[in-house]
Image: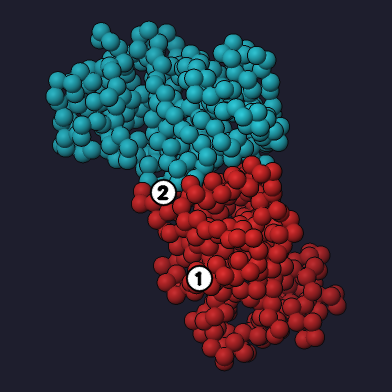
Chain colours: A cyan, B red
Amino acid sequence: MTLSLSQTVPKFRAACERVRRDGQRLGLVPTMGALHAGHRSLIEEARRRADQVFVTIFVNPTQFGPTEDLEAYPRDLEGDLTRCSEAGVAHVFAPAVSEMYPEDECTRVRVVGLTQHLCGASRPGHFEGVATIVVKLFAIVGECVAVFGRKDYQQLKVVERLTRDLNLPVEVVGHSTVRDEDGLALSSRNAHLSSEERDAARAIPLALSRAVRQFRSGERGVGALVRPVTQQLAGAGLRIDYVSVADPERLTPFDDDAATSDTALLAVAAKVGDTRLIDNVVLGEDPPPIADA
Amino acid sequence: MTLSLSQTVPKFRAACERVRRDGQRLGLVPTMGALHAGHRSLIEEARRRADQVFVTIFVNPTQFGPTEDLEAYPRDLEGDLTRCSEAGVAHVFAPAVSEMYPEDECTRVRVVGLTQHLCGASRPGHFEGVATIVVKLFAIVGECVAVFGRKDYQQLKVVERLTRDLNLPVEVVGHSTVRDEDGLALSSRNAHLSSEERDAARAIPLALSRAVRQFRSGERGVGALVRPVTQQLAGAGLRIDYVSVADPERLTPFDDDAATSDTALLAVAAKVGDTRLIDNVVLGEDPPPIADA
């Protein structure tokens, strides 16, 4: 299959319409590029669910705060196109910022209920940027199945909710986090880690794995699940943004002295050096990130 | 032609898809019901531009402020269906509030730049409600031409902008305000006016007509255009919310001591008794609302 590329909204829309006119189902994988094996896994999931897979590559400025790493975010369009081609992607949409945000553009989408806590609390405006770009992309594409990674769990829930709330004709699918051999969740930002930082980051999947086992052994106390995670991350020299146990649908954190429900999201965000990493497991559902830890 | 009715999102979506599957162009007229000759004119405009016209009837709660007239807003579904049938409408979508706003619904759309002034300033949240419901409707309908009245000029601009910004596959068309014989712009809210209030309300088209003539005679001073309007409305006992001359695209009001551009929006909002009325003319473009005034 040959890979085609579009960089303007009308051309991308026309490419999407051709797929549907041929009676085929369109699979969409929205990304910020710097594609890795996690994205490859999203593409494969989309290929299982659709006839043709389209990937969007756009480092969305509105989801970065003023002090965040927009400029430093890894970019590699040439490499990404090769990876897409190898993965059997039919079309890549890689617009310029001015194509998605023309000068007098001023429309914003926000999902009120799900963005108060976790990354929503520490990254003001982040999910408004995410929601806005996702609606823009979904409105161009139209009917499709769109695959998002569960590493960005809150983002997945935000996208699910806005799709349902706004009646967008998109089936949103969440796909399991892909991890390196040492358990670290794949992320384009991992490219920023020095080898020492990379070693330190391993505390995240280790701590999540321990919590999964505690939960399996019957532990339901929020504090008892959170404390060892906090200790392990701090002990490895990570600067913790949050370690939260939350309702897996509403994303409201449980109080420290409460007991969790039968499934509960355990989500963490922490900085290793200058690099902010996030990870999560749904306790009662997901296996431990490191099988033998 | 037979009129059909849907009240759920999936049924409405299916009706819209049938039109496109038949290779026909869909015309959409979103309304809050209590249809009058102004709506009829929107429907006729849509019929000129499309093969089948669908009307939505939904009194959208999120665009009413807590002290506004949501409860009192006129409702007449039975009469509206008759009027739609007579006007050659093919399908009416009249959902319940819970269909458009399910319990845990929490997504909102706002158009930042165009909603600071005019009705946006005096009705906080109004245009967020408008933008949200319009995106919900457009996302169900998909590709279509949608017709909106120019009486709600700021609303029309907000809808044009969000449609372009979010890449929605909708052609938005603004249609001239329809007026009663005495020049009063048709509005469902006119039903609330007593005959005395109705007489008083005529000051609005009279004042706008005078301003159009002043402008045609070369007057470009904002204060000189605004003052007689204010005086005429106040003289008729109306309680003025705003009388503004603004840029017709950006909707930024000109200062009182400035000169207008070659076309300028003159917009007014005023209460007659308990009923808030709005009206506008684009100076340099629109004829006077009352030809012989």
Vertical side of B65 occupied by A8: above or below? above
- Under mark 1, the amino acid is Glu
Q: Chain of mark 2?
A: B
Q: Give the residue displayed 49% in from the left and 81% down from the top.
A: B274
Which residue has dot 1 on it? Answer: B78
Determine whether, in the image, residue B111 is placed left or right of residue B150. left
Vertical side of B81 occupied by A31: above or below? above
Q: Is residue B187 visible?
A: yes
- Tag 2: Cα neighbours inside 10 Å, few (<14), some, or many (≥20)? some
Q: Quadrant of the C terminus of chain A?
A: top left
Vertical side of B266 occupied by A221: above or below? above
Mark 2 secondary-structure assignment: loop
Question: Are dots 1 and 2 on a single chain?
Answer: yes
Which residue has dot 2 on it? Answer: B106
Residue B12 place in picture, x, y as percent: 52, 51
Residue B243 place in picture, x, y as percent: 64, 74
Q: Nearer the viewer, residue B98 or A197?
A: B98
Of circles 1 and 2, which is in front?
1
Q: If you read the primary sequence from the N terminus, does the residue marked by circle 1 or circle 2 appear first?
A: 1
